Image: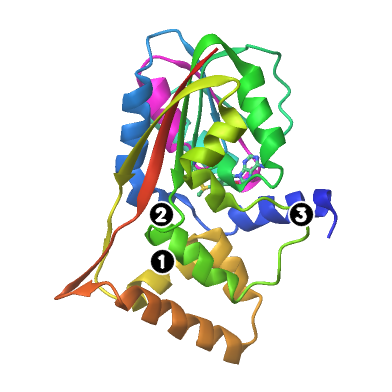
Amino acid sequence: MSFEDLKEFQGQMWGAGPFEEVEVHIADMHDALVGALAPEPGESWLDLACGTGAVAMRAAAGGAETTGIDLAPVLVETARRRADEAGLTIDYETGDCENLRFGDGSFDIVSSSVGVMFAPDQETAAAELGRVCAPGGRLGLTTWRPDGGVGEFFKFMRQFQPPMPEGIGNPLDWGREEHLQDLLGDSFELEFKELDTPFEVESGEKFWDLFSRAFGPTKVLADSMDEADREKFRQAVIDFVERERDGDMIRQSRTYLLTTGTRR
Ligand SMILES: C[S@@+](CC[C@H](N)C(=O)[O-])C[C@H]1O[C@@H](n2cnc3c(N)ncnc32)[C@H](O)[C@@H]1O
């Protein structure tokens, strides 16, 4: 698969389900990210890999002049509709965070919530974060820890997926401080904090119902299988989630890194 075909596939994959139904389960992460960046009215804010607009809406509600970019056209449409419904003015565009159309230093704040980590060319994506952020401007990222619940779920899914093409970065590397220092340390003075956004669900079956319908990567993988393999995958997902059962509920710890930075 060529790099461009991979991007096309990824845009469709992320837009394959109503991500807004998954997004609500990481709302405390969005609050933590926007709280750490504390926008002042009139500041310019770029949210990269914005999905259905959770961070952009919080930024705009806080008074920032907000732009959101995402690879998946369907998610951008949803984000636009939600901003209209909420009476918020946000510039949304479909785009690739590895290749931004904005000039150097265009934004006071640049953010990405579990988003830019999925760009296949990590050095290029990181360089774009630094390029479009104004000197003295702020960076805010959230990225899944490799050994947290979501990190483990991505690793678990890999055994059912075709191997990634050569040269594609591992998204979970963005959950390690040393890797972020390597990628971003020349452009930003960085600070790190580990946080958790636990997910509570009644059963593995309920988890499967949500993720195989609304979470693009799981839905596209499940839909690519014949009936027998899909059933094996479904049962494996249920078993994976049920490991965390505690009485009536399953409580999955999902640790992530909140990284803030000041542009040098
Ligand atoms: C897990 S979702 C997070 C969405 C949103 N930031 C949130 O926290 O609700 C990952 C998002 O990254 C987007 N994405 C992946 N690769 C991208 C790229 N190269 N450029 C822009 N967006 C990308 C996907 O389309 C998807 O919306």
Q: Report if the CB atoms under discs 2 and 3 are less than 8 Å apart.
A: no
Residue at which label 1 appears = 210
- Report the residue marked by disc 2: 21
Mark 1 surroundings: few (<14), some (14-19) or many (≥20) residues within 10 A: some
Can residue 50 be seen at all in this image of the molecule? no
Name the residue tied to disc 3.
6
Q: Can see residue 215? A: yes
Query: Could you tell me residue 4's position as x and y percent?
Result: 82, 48
Magenta-tinted stretch = 50-75
Q: At 28% from the left edge and 55% from the top edge, which residue is drawn?
A: 198
Towards the viewer: 213 or 196: 196
Mark 2 lies on a secondary structure that is helix
Mark 3 surroundings within 10 Å by alpha-carbon count, few (fewer than 14), some (14 through 19), many (20 or more): some
Q: Position of residue 6 (x, y in %)?
A: 76, 54
| Residue under the image location 69 percent in, 36 percent down | 123
Q: Is residue 158 above or below residue 230?
A: above
Q: Earlier in the sequence, mark 1 or mark 3?
A: 3
CA–CA distance between discs 2 and 3? Answer: 25 Å
Residue 74 among magenta residues: yes
Are the residues tagged 1 and 2 within 8 Å (C-beta)? yes
The quarter of the picture where the N terminus appears is: bottom right
The picture places residue 82, in percent across and down from the top left corner, at 45, 37
Query: What's the amino acid at mark 2?
Result: Glu
Asked if disc 2 is less than 8 Å from ligand 1, the answer is no
